[in-house]
Image (cartoon, helix red, strand yellow):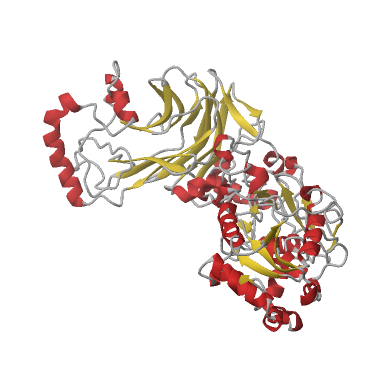
């Protein structure tokens, strides 16, 4: 009796599928450990960064924060903070951080209050492509956080602290007070220059480490600033309360970047002189501060505050806001204080996202990684004897036509000659590693036509490769006629110029001695001018009466970035997945996260795929192998029709791969 495989597959979906039960509560992994903002603590005691004993209201969503990285596959979200993740400035270029793979229906959070001038990874586009939720100072973020808080208020902090009566006008003996430890870090040098110019026209008491001209006695400031930062802010408030004006100058002037400086001054009862965020008016009560932007020069500003210091009525107009209802915008910013309920708001946001997820029937049971596999970190260890043969039943997985994508992680360990890594369709398609001089490159061949990556492989460094092939949309009929005419003309010159193919790597490779056989496999022609090609465009002499009228665009991506682009007539009308081989040619390497698609993925999708796991039933997903099990498996929806025969093939445990980013070209 003949068994209907399609019917059997559908029955297996029903029999073995897991009923997804929605569990209340959200788990968030703090990737770099506990943060300075008290996330996950309902009762956050002193001493702390804020200088306030925080007792949070119970969050409507059960929310748990953990810091054990080994549970990365179990949580609903992973929170990354730029400073502990990637250190200061561009350190991440030389010391790439370890970065986990995102599970299906898991969310990645970019968290922090500092800006990209200090920690540029936070807004780096190739980092942000992996981020689902931003929770920083920016008002455009999904979960904004602020520093509009009751700094240094110890046990009685709330928004009403801002109504505290200031020291009487007559009792404020100081004129302008300034306290800072930073004179030139980041963009602070600009504010420092402004203050120096102010000092030429009036007395500014600089009581911190920056521009210090007035010492505080031990009684006023009994400990070093960073021994207890929260208490230092309480002391700063007391010191500034005796000054008519205080300088609240940000390190950098960035929209929405409003730190504790202006709020400490407001709490002190001194009038803040503010330099910083262009939209500061959205962050403070009306007429509560003096902005440097309102004056043409430091001298003009000094003249104005001297006027106020001699005019009590005009001076006290800056405290009228304390008698009025707080503006909604100020209350809103206070309610978004990073220390109060930001963790709860983040959990609520994720909880709302989770409610929209429908995992459907069969996920993690008949396709997709089972939970026990997702917790592992394993790769395929390829030695000289390794051969993994993969066959998909063509009755249920038809051949690829016109377009496809193949993606994988690769680390090279020992190659001396050109060695195939992956072959398909009885070697009709070959992905191999080839040596050019002393470097190694990924080479993609379809039948007799071959293409190289521009970026070399580095020994013992993981790189992510993707080869995306699809119909060229930029080549016109005129281009094709031009191409053929040019070919006829160029054939006369090929004896002398046959090696001048493309740029850079290809040129140096083809000009080397003893490489004539390899150069014959590349295609040579004049490039049609209407096509945009980044590096090389290799097109063979074509008989247009026997092939498709539309050429293919071949794109090679390295670490999620377009590396090389070529255009060629591949005649890609039938590429079978019934014969796929991994290894089998005495190569020594490690391979991970192999996926093959029936579509030509673009740069955004490929970049995200580097650190993203798939369900396995995405449209066009033909084969999906993560190698996270001791057994070698296909996790795609086609696994019912996939036969895998491994020989001398093992998977081995590794750590997380690195997030390798670049800057500029």
Q: Position of residue 390 (x, y in %)?
A: 52, 32
Residue 344 visible within the image: yes
Residue 140 appears in which quarter of the rendering? Answer: bottom right
> Relative to 159, does residue 623 appear above or below in the rendering?
above
Observer-nearest residue: 142 or 115?
Answer: 115
* Residue at left offset 83%, top offset 65%: 58
Q: Is residue 392 left or right of residue 21?
A: left
Q: Position of residue 90 (x, y in %)?
A: 56, 42
> Relative to 399, does residue 269 appear above or below in the rendering?
below
Q: Position of residue 577 (x, y in %)?
A: 46, 37
> Relative to 622, does residue 327 appear above or below in the rendering?
below
| Image quadrant where one finds the C terminus | top left
Observer-nearest residue: 487 or 135?
Answer: 135
Label count reads 0
Q: Position of residue 568 (x, y in %)?
A: 28, 40
Q: Is residue 551 left or right of residue 495?
A: right
Observer-nearest residue: 654 or 264?
Answer: 264
Q: Is residue 546 left or right of residue 31?
A: left
């Amino acid at each position: 009796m003949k068994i209907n495989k399609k019917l059997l597959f559908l029955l297996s979906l029903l029999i073995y599928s897991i009923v997804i039960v929605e569990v209340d509560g959200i788990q968030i992994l703090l990737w770099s450990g506990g943060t300075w903002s008290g996330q996950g603590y309902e009762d956050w005691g002193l001493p702390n960064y804020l200088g306030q004993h925080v007792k949070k209201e119970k969050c409507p969503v059960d929310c748990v924060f953990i810091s054990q990285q080994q549970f990365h596959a179990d949580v609903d979200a992973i929170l990354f903070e730029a400073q502990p993740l990637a250190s200061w400035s561009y350190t991440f270029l030389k010391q790439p951080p370890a970065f986990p793979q995102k599970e299906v229906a898991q969310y990645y959070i970019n968290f922090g209050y500092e800006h990209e001038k200090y920690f540029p990874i936070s807004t780096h586009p190739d980092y942000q492509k992996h981020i689902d939720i931003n929770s920083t100072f920016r008002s455009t973020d999904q979960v904004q956080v602020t520093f509009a808080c009751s700094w240094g208020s110890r046990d009685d902090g709330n928004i009403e602290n801002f109504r505290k009566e200031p020291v009487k006008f007559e009792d404020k003996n100081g004129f302008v007070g300034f306290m800072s430890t930073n004179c030139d870090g980041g963009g602070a040098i600009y504010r420092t220059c402004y203050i120096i110019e102010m000092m030429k026209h009036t007395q500014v008491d600089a009581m911190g480490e920056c521009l210090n001209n007035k010492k505080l006695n031990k009684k006023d400031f009994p400990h070093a600033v960073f021994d207890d930062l929260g208490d230092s802010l309480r002391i700063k408030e007391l010191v500034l309360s005796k000054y008519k004006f205080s300088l609240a100058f940000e390190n950098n002037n960035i929209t929405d970047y409003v730190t504790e400086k202006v709020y400490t001054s407001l709490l002190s009862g001194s009038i803040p002189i503010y330099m910083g965020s262009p939209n500061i008016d959205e962050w403070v009560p009306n007429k509560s501060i003096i902005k440097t932007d309102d004056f043409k020069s430091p001298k003009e500003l000094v003249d104005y505050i001297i006027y106020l210091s001699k005019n009590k009525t005009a001076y006290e107009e800056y405290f009228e806001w304390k008698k009025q209802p707080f503006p909604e915008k100020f209350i809103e910013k206070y309610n978004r204080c990073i220390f109060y309920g930001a963790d709860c708001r983040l959990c609520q946001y994720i909880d709302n996202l989770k409610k929209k997820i429908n995992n459907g029937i069969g996920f993690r049971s008949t396709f997709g990684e089972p939970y026990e596999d997702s917790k592992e970190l394993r790769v395929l260890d390829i030695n000289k004897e390794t051969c993994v043969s993969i066959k998909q039943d063509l009755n249920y997985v038809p051949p690829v036509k016109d377009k496809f994508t193949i993606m994988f992680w690769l680390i090279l360990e020992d190659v001396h000659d050109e060695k195939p890594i992956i072959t398909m369709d009885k070697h009709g398609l070959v992905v191999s590693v080839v040596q050019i001089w002393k470097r190694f490159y990924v080479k993609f061949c379809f039948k007799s036509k071959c293409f190289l990556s521009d970026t070399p492989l580095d020994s013992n460094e993981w790189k992510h490769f993707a080869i995306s092939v699809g119909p060229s949309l930029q080549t016109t009929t005129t281009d094709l006629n031009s191409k053929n005419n040019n070919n006829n003309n160029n054939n006369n010159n090929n004896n002398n110029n046959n090696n001048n193919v493309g740029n850079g790597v290809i040129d140096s490779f083809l000009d080397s001695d003893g490489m004539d056989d390899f150069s014959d496999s590349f295609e040579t022609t004049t490039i049609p001018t209407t096509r945009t090609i980044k590096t090389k465009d290799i097109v063979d002499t074509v008989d247009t009466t026997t092939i498709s009228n539309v050429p293919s665009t071949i794109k090679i991506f390295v670490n999620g970035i377009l590396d090389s682009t070529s255009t060629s007539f591949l005649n890609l009308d039938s590429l079978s997945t019934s014969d796929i081989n991994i290894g089998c040619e005495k190569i020594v390497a490690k391979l991970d996260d192999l996926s093959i698609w029936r579509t030509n993925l673009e740069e955004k999708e490929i970049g995200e795929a580097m650190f993203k796991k798939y369900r396995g039933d995405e449209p066009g997903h033909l084969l999906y192998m993560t190698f996270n099990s001791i057994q070698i498996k296909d996790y795609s929806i086609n696994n019912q029709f996939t036969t895998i025969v491994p020989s001398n093939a093992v998977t081995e445990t590794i750590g997380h791969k690195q997030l390798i980013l670049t800057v500029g070209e």
